Amino acid sequence: MKKIFFLLLIITNTIGAQTIDELFEKANTLYKNGDYKKAIAAYQEIEKTQQISDALYYNLGNSYYKLNKVAPTIYNYEKALQINPLHQDTANNLVFAKRLTLDRIEKLPQTFLQRINKNYLQKLSYNTWSILTIIFSFLSVLLFLGFYFAEIPFKKRLFFTTSILSFLLLFTTLAITYSQYNYHQKNKVAIIFAEKTEIKNAPTLNSDTVFTLHEGTKIILLDAVDTWKKIKLADGKIGWILSDDLKEL
């Protein structure tokens, strides 16, 4: 009975994978034929199955770009880079997409550590860093066992040195994983989807407008009160926006 159950499970998963592949191929064909709206609908059907990937959001971004939909284009490119920060085609296309936005926001100067974090550590997601941590943990144990059971002095020294190095890499990647996870938890971002929205100095409609933003602008989320979100821009400006005017990444 168990064998039949596992066989049915394998068959179901195989059929599901084939269906996703077929739907992805159909969406790609629609995109190539210039039917971008139908291509988007097909890609979104895949998204509903939770079979997401950087390629899926990259293609969604390209489809919206062809329709001149600024906010959805940037949103999907950013989603692709969340999954795979090293996807160079997405990064390149995002540069072009951002040129379509109306808001020009100057970033605050970064410290040396912030530049290291941005230019190097964030090139890998914290999930990737966690995988590296697990790899180094297994490697450290294996090398230590090699040191423990080795009888030849040269091999003992070799296993000891490499195990120490592996342990150091283990603690380094663990620290990076922890810091990257905390960074992403504290720096949740969103994309403005409203064509134009007023940013208030308090979470009420009758409060003063401090500045205006347009679709496609990326912002950092700080807090939430009822239907309002407290946001921060790359230049340090802070204000409140209606939740319906943005979409969280």
Image (cartoon, helix red, strand yellow):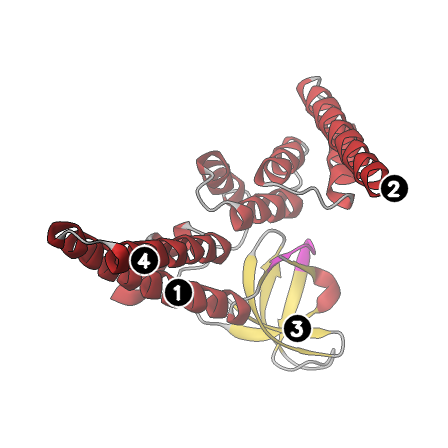
Q: Which amino acid, by three-letter code, is at mark 2? A: Met
Q: Which residue is mark 2?
A: 1
Q: Which residues are magenta?
A: 190-196
Q: Earlier in the sequence, mark 4 or mark 1?
A: 4
Asked where in the image residue 248 lies, by quadrant, the reply is: bottom right
Q: Is 194 contained in the magenta span?
A: yes
Residue 129 locus on image (x, y percent) = 43, 56
Most foreground residue, 182 or 224: 182
Q: Which residue is mark 1?
A: 174
Q: What whole-number distance in Å separates the C-alpha atoms at marks 3 and 1?
A: 32 Å
Of tags 4 and 1, which is closer to the observer? 4
Q: Quadrant of the C terminus?
A: bottom right
Q: Is residue 199 left or right of residue 95?
A: right
Q: Earlier in the sequence, mark 4 or mark 3?
A: 4
Q: Is residue 235 visible?
A: no
Q: Earlier in the sequence, mark 3 or mark 2?
A: 2
Disc assigned to residue 229: 3
Q: Secondary structure at mark 1?
A: helix
Q: Secondary structure at mark 3?
A: strand
Disc assigned to residue 145: 4
Q: What whole-number distance in Å separates the C-alpha atoms at marks 3 and 2?
A: 53 Å
The local crowd at label 1, few if under 14, some if 14 to 19, many if 20 or more residues have their Cα within 10 Å, is many
Residue 82 locus on image (x, y percent) = 54, 51
Q: Earlier in the sequence, mark 4 or mark 2?
A: 2
Please say if 156 is above or below 81: below
Q: What whole-number distance in Å separates the C-alpha atoms at marks 4 and 3?
A: 53 Å
Most foreground residue, 218 or 153: 153
